[in-house]
Amino acid sequence: MGVDGVEDLIRVAGLARQRAERIIGLARMFIEGRLGDWICRLGVEEARRLLLSIKGVGEKTADLVLLMYCRLPAFPIDTHIRRVSSRISIGGSYSTIRRSFLEVLNDVEELIAVHVKLISIGRLFCKPKRPRCSECPLRECCSYAAERGGDSCSKKGG
Ligand code: SF4
């Protein structure tokens, strides 16, 4: 199909040329055996290093592959999780937030559940502007909500 053909198919996603080149590069790696199921057997750290060495693969994508595909303990942080985390006082760099969750959760199913729920909370309640704190399931433990007058763990000493 070539880069032009792939670019036509994914144009709606934006950055189509760059993404088409990367998709073809990844497909080539699969065909040549430089990527495949076997990476999941390397363990988290080595598999992560390998994924991050691939052009176009960043921390979030690497962690998504590790958690959702390989079923290894990883924690991908997207823009929603970053925003919710910072508002509930788990802020900082990607690696700081990631480490905070991995320190308390090491069961893969639990990590997936928390990952998915935080994204939903970010989409439904914790919007960048005007978060809907009164409806949010995290409101009792949220410092951002507490500062704005809601109930919070800190107010209850929890
Ligand atoms: S209580 Fe408000 S600020 Fe805190 S996580 Fe929920 S929506 Fe976001």
Image (spheres, grey):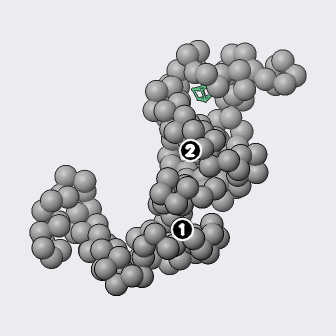
20 relative position to 104: left or right: left
Residue under the image location 12 percent in, 73 percent down? 1
Residue 122 appearing in the image: no
Indicate the amino acid at tag 2: Ile
Percent of width and height locating residue 70: 52, 60
Q: Callout 1, which amino acid?
A: Cys
Which quarter is ligand 1 in?
Answer: top right
Q: Dot 1: within a 10 Å radius of its alpha carbon, few (fewer than 14), some, or many (20 or more) residues?
A: some
Q: Secondary structure at mark 2?
A: helix
Is the distance from the Cβ of mark 2 to the nearest ligand 1 atom less than 8 Å? no
Numbered label tally? 2
In the rendered structure, find residue 71 and report the number of the disc placed on it: none
Q: Residue 36, located in which quarter of the rendered image?
A: bottom left
Please, is residue 146 above or below residue 56 in the view? above
Which residue matches tag 2? 112
Q: Quadrant of residue 81?
A: top right
Q: Quadrant of the C terminus?
A: top right
Instruction: Work out how far the residue at label 2 is from the one at label 1, CA to CA, in angstroms.
Output: 17 Å
User: Residue at the spot x=79%, y=23% of the render?
Assistant: 153
Residue at 69 percent of width and 16 percent of height? 150
The spot of residue 132 in percent (x, y) is 52, 21
Position in image of residue 71 (x %, y %): 55, 55
Between discs 2 and 1, the one toward the N terminus = 1
